[in-house]
Amino acid sequence: MRYISTRGQAPALTFEEAMLSGLARDGGLYVPETIPQMSDADIRALHGLPYEEVAFRVMRPFVGDGFTDEVFADLIAKAYAGFGHNARAPLVQLAPGHFLLELFHGPTLAFKDFAMQLIGQLFEEAMTRRGERVTIVGATSGDTGSAAIEAFRGLDAVDVFILYPHGRVSEVQRRQMTTPVESNVHALALHGHFDDCQARLKDMFNHFEFRDSVRLAGVNSINWARVLAQVVYFFSSAVSLGAPERKVSFTVPTGNFGDIFAGYIAKRMGLPIDRLVVATNQNDILHRCLSSGAYETDEVVPSISPSMDIQVSSNFERALFDAYDRDGAAVAQLMDELKQGGFRVSQGALQALREHFDSGRVSEDETMATIAEANRSMGELLCPHSAIGVRVAEAGRDPAVPMITLATAHPAKFPDAVEEASGIRPPLPQRMADLYDRAERVTEVENDLAALEALIQERIAQ
Ligand SMILES: *Cc1c(COP(=O)(O)O)cnc(C)c1O
């Protein structure tokens, strides 16, 4: 299995090389050259299997020879051993035909643990085998950073630097990043928005001299290995509702288009998915684009669902690549236009996107009302991101097709908003109840590439 860039100009890589490099050298994102297929019989055979076994069968064809079957199965087992729920991704019913996929039982209480815990294991294995050291730099709107730090803390072959927008993450998110005591963990609070963090991260990857000198690796949602790990729970949940005999739809609270793109890959592999519904908050570039074809960046307006406060949705490039029949030059041109503020998706490509994706946008008031309503009528405390999904799903779903809404974070990760909406302050699970008592360690940084690079070089030299 080889991986090619969405901009058509970078060399094709193996799974392991694509995982270790993150962003392609032509600025594009890696995608598999072909999509492995699961037949109806393959899907039927997943019924009743443990999550880890489903994960192995779904991911194995993408991974290639770099990891043996035995090693890969062992890394999957280690990745999910620390989850607080035996099912890993349990499904609960909200209403007739509407289900919630709880993806928040990992160590940092958000769905990103599914990918990050596995990536930590894969990196450690690959670097140990190569006898090398890497510098992981990530940009986060809150949840990626805590998940990455949790996955990489204390590893010998890795330094991890996380850029987050100063003052714009929740206290739980911040503390999860600033309280680990391991010296290979570096939390950096950048004066700017998430998009600034992401832009500086991309700058570092495009500065090849720096990139090579620190052996830079990325674990943002642009990393293919993360997308792949997220494909698994689309299979496990659909199968538990009767796939492949019965179609299901998914609603996914979305910012960077990573999680929903994983659903699209599941569909391309053969999982019978009817609709994939993008649910955005007031930062609604994806909803506007799918509605009108115009992909135009706007100011980020901070919301109570901060992990979706994004105006440049990185993984959307992968969907565009397919919608433009894998024409890398066409994608490269759109991305050039984006630097001037936006682009218009061609009619043909927009039609191709709409074959798979629907979308909806939820205001702050509607998010709060949905949290209150779900608590009142279902006894379910939703985090604001998950509430956005539930709202969009309820507004547009076909009663004949079961809808699965992804619950992307635990309500206790956003206790202020949840309490204001529902009157209930969700407690942290027992295993992290002392988070508010631990000492914090963080470095404030300016939105300046040269200063950031100097800081990273200085820290890893120590
Ligand atoms: C990251 C995140 C999202 C958005 O996921 P994408 O893959 O960026 O679309 C939604 N909800 C929560 C809680 C998140 O942490």
Image (tube, rainbow, N blue to C red):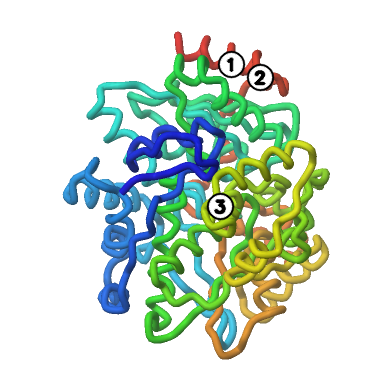
Which of the 4 quarters of the picture holds residue 363?
Answer: bottom right
Q: Which mark is residue 453?
A: 1
Q: Which mark is residue 449?
A: 2
Which of the 4 quarters of the picture holds residue 272?
Answer: bottom left
Q: Is residue 262 left or right of residue 56?
A: right
Relative to the observer, which residue lies in front, 229 or 382?
Answer: 229
Type of amino acid at the residue the image marks with label 2: Leu
Q: Which mark is residue 321?
A: 3
Relative image position of residue 1 (x, y in whole percent): 31, 49
Q: Is residue 229 left or right of residue 278?
A: left
Relative image position of residue 390 (x, y in whole percent): 65, 71
Rendered residue at 52%/45% (across/down): 6
The CA span between labels 1 and 2 is: 6 Å
Looking at the image, residue 53 lies above or below residue 172: below
Relative image position of residue 270 (x, y in whole percent): 39, 71
- Helix, strand or loop for disc 2: helix
Q: Characterize the local packing of mark 2: few (<14), some (14-19) or many (20 or more) Cα atoms within 10 angstroms.
A: some
Q: Characterize the local packing of mark 1: few (<14), some (14-19) or many (20 or more) Cα atoms within 10 angstroms.
A: some
Rendered residue at 56%/34% (across/down): 27
Looking at the image, residue 395 lies above or below residue 83: below
Q: Nearer the viewer, mark 3 or mark 1?
A: 3
Q: Nearer the viewer, mark 3 or mark 2?
A: 3
Q: Is residue 42 left or right of residue 376?
A: left
The CA span between labels 3 and 2 is: 29 Å
- Helix, strand or loop for disc 1: helix
Type of amino acid at the residue the image marks with label 3: Phe
**Are circles 1 and 2 on residues that touch, CB within 8 Å?**
yes
